[in-house]
Image (cartoon, rainbow, N blue to C red):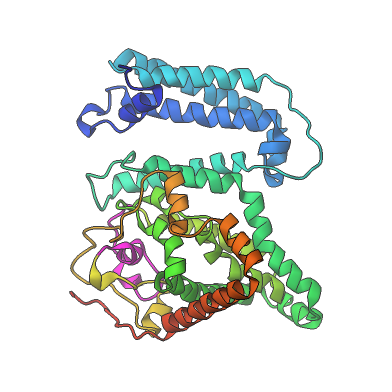
Amino acid sequence: MTGPSLRQKLRSELETAPETRRFGSGWFAGTIGFLLAVGCLFLSVCRAFPGIFVTPQLSLAFAQAWFSSALIAAMAVAFGLALVNLALRPNRILGLAAMAVTLLAGLIAQLNPVETSGAGLYFGLDFFVLNVVLTGLLFVPLERLSPLKREQRLFRTEWREDLFYYFVSSLMVQVLTFLAMAPSNAVMATTAWASFRAMVFALPMVVQVALIMVFTDFVQYWLHRAFHRVPALWRFHAVHHSTTHLDWVSGLRTHPADGALLAPPFVLLIAAGFDPAFPGVLAVVQIVTGLFLHANVRWRWRLLHRIVITPEFHHWHHADEPAARDTNYSTFLPLWDLVFGTYRMPRHRRPQRYGIAEPMPSGLVHQLRYPLRDLPPVRRVVRQGLRHPVRSARRLSVSVRRGARQLWASARRPTRAFVHSDV
């Protein structure tokens, strides 16, 4: 009978009970050292293979002398924290793992950068490390200083799945960017809106930003509402809502197809002639804001409730309560929920539980496959289409009409506003 694997030992130590990881126990040193060592390993891989794992916007930084010095310093800190863990903690798995990963990162860092062919394909490993470090440094202290649920730990249930969603989406940043830009490029190439685009581009920066904010929030309100009310779309969005613990990491749990919710407004904005830099910056702001809205913080900010959305606003959107379902769809401005009757902000209480009523499998692979459950294999669909093209066309037409009716019903369905009620 075999014992627990190295992965299981690491997970068990990271998720250990709070009373066994107090300051001075060596747990914090081991955890920070291990995470820092993993970051150094990823950055060493990026430095050794810049043409594969580095985004063009960050490629110059990896060639600078200060980057090598900073990487060596980070590895030294990780190794030092590993030694502290070994000295203070009986369970030394984090310290030993941190030392091993640091040594591997040091060996890879000695490699000369490998020049690759100019195929233009890359995976944003550096983008993942930079985002996790920056957002972690921002949100982890906030959640520790002012937690809504004090008993909730950083390494809580399914934290690995949520972080891995972010890892996959970061590696695919080039593909996702291409998919978002390709439709707008196609529209610009096939339409004669030169004068209109020039007029839009000439608008003052403040006006462009204001129009982009309002337009994006309006479109995404209705797209978000459709993802909740249309069953075929809810299959994908349910993955995001399946988490039963809200914190900044849970905001990363998004099915790739669900990410299409962000694309249409930006496609239209770029095609209409807005400066491409503004939608790009807005996309980054929207990602960071989305993480903050999921954060485990207790701030209420009641004076802002009807002006901008807050973590409490979005927590009600994730609440697993009948009265809270189909509410609070907005991304920036609660105006649209107020206008269309989907606003909910009870005055004297907070959500008690999160998640969805339907069962969601655990594990990244099973969750990615979840929206495709009960669907026939692609091979069978193609074979039936070739054998019975007329019948298949009729079925497709019925499905399209059903989807159109569901979209229309999601827009017309009467909803009830819960404005600062105690219901």
Residue located at (26% from left, 53% from top): 148
Among the 4 quarters of the image, the one containing residue 25: top left
Q: In the figure, residue 339 lies in which quadrant?
A: bottom left
Q: Is residue 278 visible?
A: no
Q: Quadrant of residue 317?
A: bottom left
Comparing 232 with 227, the one in front is 232
| Residue 391, horizontal then vertical, whole percent | 58, 74
In this rendered view, identify the residue nearer to me: 85 or 380: 380
Residue occupying image coordinates x 50% and y 61%: 258
| Horizontal relation, residue 209 to residue 9: left or right | right
Read off the magenta span: 296-320
In the rendered view of the protein, which quadrant contains the C terminus?
bottom left
User: Is residue 40 part of the magenta span, yes or no?
Assistant: no
Q: Is residue 354 above or below residue 190?
A: above
> Which sits in the foreground, 309 or 382?
382
Q: Residue 332, percent across and down?
A: 46, 69
User: Residue 399: image x %, image y %?
Assistant: 52, 75
| Magenta highlight on residue 299 | yes
Residue for point 26% across, 79% down: 418
